[in-house]
């Protein structure tokens, strides 16, 4: 993942080639013609005030409802994460306060589509002010507005034209609802101008196995039909690449596929040091897909993803049913369940403590569970019931733990619910620095490097513009990880990683060198990490970790490690 200069630079070896740099968020390389997503339909510039505001209000609301119905219909045939996102977007379209804002604007003299645009922008400003998850939903909100405006005008919904050949999709930003419904057989890759590593679009693209690069400044100016190659790992986008380079990339893809097919089974270093390779999942369908993969279990089940669109608290029975289905494909394997990480960027309607000045630093994760023990109790009860009925090795961990006292409190709740194994996420620098004491209170820890980077660097993870600071290769982030690993070792507790960094094969080697005992990631990333481990001994990993820790910048750390790994691996990644 590299970010940086966005201005194209001409490639010396090919006069027409232009190299753009972005942030690689879903690995893999692709080559094909660009298809530009259509810009959203704007309200006509000269639109007069609605003649009959009451009738216009009815039309606008009917359009929002039509948009919601269309999204819900798409949700029926989508996979878990996509389905939740589509349903959540449909909920925005059904929001009565949004409809009321449109009616207010119509009554104040705005034209039928201008009123929709104004209401959407009013809500967008409120969402942006809230920051975090809400700011992230602004893309969804604008997508809903653009669809409603197109509907009122009788024009086709904005977004992608129908693809007629395998293509690389370019867009300002793709709404999650659009990403979720992309046809995998025709979308070779995604390039966007906005978005970040942990944006919905990035997470979806990785889950769908579509290479993606975000933060490419010139993404929308590449003419349609232009051949482009993209590398979803390094973030490099080459416009009109040298045919020889394309051929070399294709050969490299084939070599990588062949190398990946050679190594299967548990994660271990060349000298047999075991490092479990696990999947990150967000629901039942993810579990079914991941369960069929060559993984040793689940290292992070983000339970809050299941309930993002739930209005009322799910009952113990409803939750038990879901957890049973998640555990079933993993009989005989481990499943690490994270209790609801609600609040901040992932608010849940049924566990909301009200507005906060700074939600990312507010009552989120375990802090919210402590304020709402009823919600935690119901979840632990359901997890206990479901795990008793399946053969999965269920372990439960808490998000956003800061102190040893919090860890102790959580372990007591878990054990009281009849669950044997309790752990904590280490994603707050305070917990990382006191990892020995925090982990002595529980059975295991899991580094959440997404939040750990956010809190160490004081950089909002949803802010794509700050991706350089959020880079997990940042020396300070590596130092904090090293401190946590040292504490875990003193406490004699296993410490995994379940943040996005675990899926970067080079960084995975560093993490293992620092003492990390398991790695959990999107299933599409497991193969390359397994290959990296098998080609290095534990001592190699330690030497790579030392090299990374000595570097003065993320780029230098990455380069130092790349230069020191086995040449056969460097050639493939
Ligand atoms: C993390 O913070 O690294 C993590 C794995 O949790 P999430 O991305 O869900 O916050
Ligand atoms: Mg986190």
Image (tube, grey):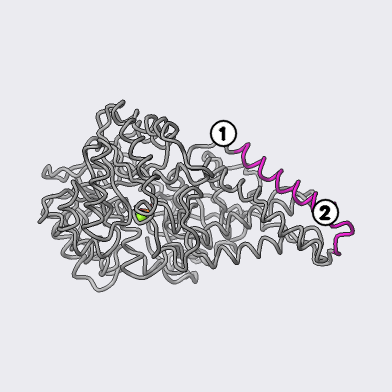
Would you identify the image quadrant in which residue 457 lies? bottom left
Q: Is residue 418 above or below residue 149?
A: above
Give the quadrant of ligand 1: bottom left
- Expressed as whole percent of the image width and height from the top left, the position of residue 204 reads 47, 47
**Upstream in the sequence, badge 1 or badge 2?**
2
The N terminus sits in image quarter:
bottom left
Q: Magenta residues, as a range?
A: 48-74
Q: Is residue 57 magenta?
A: yes
- Expressed as whole percent of the image width and height from the top left, the position of residue 519 reads 26, 47
Is the CB of mark 1 within 8 Å of ligand 1?
no
- Residue 424 horizontal side relative to residue 73, left or right: left
Between 292 and 531, which is closer to the camera in this rendering? 292
- Expressed as whole percent of the image width and height from the top left, the position of residue 227 reads 54, 54
Q: Which residue is mark 2?
A: 56
Q: Which residue is mark 1?
A: 77
Magenta stretch, overall SS: helix
Label 1 – label 2 distance at C-alpha = 33 Å
Would you identify the image quadrant in which residue 255 lies? top left
Residue lying farthest to the bottom in this orientation:
552
Between 563 and 411, which is closer to the camera in this rendering? 411
Foreground label between 1 and 2: 2
- Residue 53 horizontal side relative to residue 469, left or right: right
Q: Is residue 166 magenta?
A: no
- Residue visible at 35% across and 60% down? 451
SS label for mark 1 = loop
């Amino acid at each position: 993942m590299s970010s940086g200069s966005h201005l194209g630079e001409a490639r010396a070896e090919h006069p027409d080639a232009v190299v753009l740099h972005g942030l690689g968020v879903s690995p893999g390389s692709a080559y094909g013609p660009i298809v530009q997503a259509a810009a959203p339909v704007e309200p006509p510039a000269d639109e007069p005030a609605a003649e009959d505001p009451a009738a216009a209000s009815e039309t606008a609301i009917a359009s929002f409802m039509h948009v919601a119905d269309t999204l819900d219909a798409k949700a029926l045939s989508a996979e878990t994460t996509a389905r939740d996102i589509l349903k959540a977007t449909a909920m925005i379209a059904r929001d009565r306060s949004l409809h009321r804002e449109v009616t207010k604007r119509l009554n104040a003299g705005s034209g039928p589509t201008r009123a929709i645009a104004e209401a959407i922008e009013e809500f967008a400003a409120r969402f942006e002010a809230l920051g975090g998850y809400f700011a992230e939903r602004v893309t969804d909100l604008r997508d809903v507005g653009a669809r409603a405006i197109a509907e009122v005008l009788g024009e086709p919904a904005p977004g992608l034209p129908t693809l007629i050949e395998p293509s690389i999709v370019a867009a300002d930003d793709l709404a999650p609802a659009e990403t979720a419904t992309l046809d995998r057989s025709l979308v070779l890759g995604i390039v966007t101008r906005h978005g970040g590593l942990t944006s919905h679009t990035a997470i979806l693209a990785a889950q769908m196995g579509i290479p993606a690069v975000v933060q490419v400044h010139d993404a929308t100016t590449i003419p349609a039909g232009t051949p482009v190659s993209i590398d979803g790992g390094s973030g490099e986008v080459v416009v009109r690449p040298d045919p020889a380079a394309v051929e070399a990339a294709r050969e490299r893809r084939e070599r990588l596929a062949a190398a990946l097919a050679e190594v299967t089974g548990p994660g271990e270093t060349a000298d047999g040091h075991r490092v479990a390779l696990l999947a990150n999942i967000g629901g039942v369908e993810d579990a079914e897909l991941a369960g069929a993969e060559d993984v040793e279990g689940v290292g992070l089940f983000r339970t809050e993803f299941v309930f993002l669109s739930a209005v009322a608290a799910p009952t113990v029975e409803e939750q038990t049913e879901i957890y049973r289905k998640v555990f079933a494909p993993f009989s005989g394997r481990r499943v690490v369940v994270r209790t609801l990480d609600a609040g901040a960027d992932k608010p849940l309607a049924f566990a909301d403590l009200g507005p906060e000045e700074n939600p990312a630093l507010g009552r989120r994760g375990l802090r919210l569970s402590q304020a709402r023990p009823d919600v935690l109790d119901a979840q632990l009860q359901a997890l206990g019931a479901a795990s008793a009925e399946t053969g999965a090795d269920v372990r439960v961990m808490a998000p956003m733990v800061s102190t040893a006292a919090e860890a102790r409190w959580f372990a007591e709740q878990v054990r009281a619910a009849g669950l044997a194994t309790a752990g904590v996420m280490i994603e707050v620098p305070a917990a990382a620095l006191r990892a020995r004491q925090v982990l002595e209170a529980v059975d295991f820890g899991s580094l959440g490097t997404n939040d750990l980077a956010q809190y160490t660097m004081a950089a909002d993870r949803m802010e794509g513009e700050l991706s350089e600071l959020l880079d997990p290769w940042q020396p300070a982030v590596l130092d904090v990880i090293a401190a946590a690993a040292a504490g875990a070792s003193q406490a004699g507790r296993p410490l995994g990683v379940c943040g996005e960094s675990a899926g970067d094969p080079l960084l995975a080697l560093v993490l293992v060198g620092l003492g990390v005992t398991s790695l959990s990631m999107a299933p599409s990333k497991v193969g390359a990490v397994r290959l990296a481990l098998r080609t290095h001994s534990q001592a190699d990993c330690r030497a790579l970790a030392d090299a990374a820790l000595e570097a003065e910048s993320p780029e230098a750390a990455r380069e130092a490690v790349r230069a020191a790994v086995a040449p056969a691996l460097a050639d493939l990644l």
